[in-house]
Amino acid sequence: MRILLIGASGTLGAAVGATLAGRGHELVTVGRTAGDLRYDITEPGAIARLYAAAGPVDAVVSTAGDVPFKPFGELTTDHYRAAFEGKVLSQVELVSQGLAHVAERSSFTLIGGVLSREPIVTGSAASMANGAVEAFVRAAAIEIAPRRVNAVSPTVFTESLAEYGDYFPGFPPVDLADVAQAYVRSVEGAGTGQVYVL
Amino acid sequence: MRILLIGASGTLGAAVGATLAGRGHELVTVGRTAGDLRYDITEPGAIARLYAAAGPVDAVVSTAGDVPFKPFGELTTDHYRAAFEGKVLSQVELVSQGLAHVAERSSFTLIGGVLSREPIVTGSAASMANGAVEAFVRAAAIEIAPRRVNAVSPTVFTESLAEYGDYFPGFPPVDLADVAQAYVRSVEGAGTGQVYVL
């Protein structure tokens, strides 16, 4: 398949890209500052330009979402709006604008995360964003068939424990290789409206 | 208790208000166009003025959230933003701005809904909003203790079947009286970070 990979240069994006490429897929990588195409998908207008530049694709894979992490008392209106624009609206727009550009049997795979179901300190805006993405996926799926949409919802990555482990005390981590397999399952499988929990 | 009731003139707000008043609580009712205090809580600045006007309260109860319902292909960027501002950010701000105004053992009870977990046609923006609210509640709860925050997440009301039943084919409805009891449980109980599913 020809796959549009958003956030290809990130920790998760690199792992997902390597796994998908290893399975013979052709990747079109997208990032703010790296990749075949350079766009900031938190700007809805940029998504239209991205799809126009990318040409036809069989799958859209998102591994990118920016949300602020701060103690609850420091999260302001602007932070919640930034979380919405940076992780929710950006991915919603990938789907809604993408419908006109993707093949009839194509799929969208979005990124959610464990904070939708389990909280951590400093994570209120992130929880809000992940809950929004995962509920959106369930809803959009029933209206975009035969196109499909799923979310991958991982806990903290084993490879990121050194950096973020203190925020996830006692959370069993997941290997990036296993998260990448959830993307494979979404892209090559037939599921829709699913949230793959890892 | 002295309870700030947001959305008091709506179908749900009226039922919750009657139940809480019947249990001896003093209500301060809030609405856009009706109630003791008139504010549009989808404007963050209005929430600051609302709390200043309301004086000290022991509980904040929200029964109001505006989201657009449209077929997936007709939902635009602006509709998703309206859903976020109208049901998510408004209620997030009730909690974050409210912390400075409520008693130490007070509670916030927000409104989510069944679309967070089960989709209906035209409901993608509403699902997104409800998923955001319910995940936010779980996260905020761990940082605002001893203050509490919960969400009530009802399916379609029995009393609203004539108007909305066609959108919820086969969904078992819930009586408003039962939904009001979930608010009582949140306000008078000790639970926090809970989503009361009805």
Image (cartoon, coloured by chain):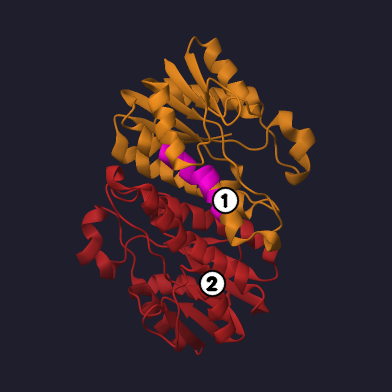
Chain colours: A red, B orange
Mark 1: secondary structure: helix
Q: Which mark is residue A45?
A: 2
Q: Residue at x 72, y 28 (%)?
A: B159
Residue B93 among those drawn in magenta: yes
C-alpha distance separating marks 1 and 2: 18 Å
Mark 1 Cα-neighbour bin, 10 Å: few <14, some 14–19, many ≥20? some
Please state the chain letter of the residue tagged with numbered disc 2 in the rendered image: A
Would you say the magenta stretch is mainly helix, strand or loop? helix
Quarter where residue B178 is shown: top right
Which amino acid, mark 2?
A: Gly
Residue at the spot x=36%, y=20% of the render?
A: B56
Is B174 above or below relative to A102?
Answer: above
Q: Residues within 10 Å of mark 2 (few under 14, many from 20)?
A: few
**Image location of residue A34, percent across then percent down:** 37, 83
In the foreground, A195 or A35: A35
Extent of the magenta region: B81-94
Q: Is residue A75 shown to the viewer in this render?
A: yes
Identify the image quadrant of residue B58: top left
Name the residue tied to disc 1. B82
Quadrant of the frame with the C terminus of chain B:
top right
In reply to whether residue B26 is colored magenta, the answer given is no
Front residue (pair A186, B26): B26
Residue A167 in percent (x, y) is at 25, 54
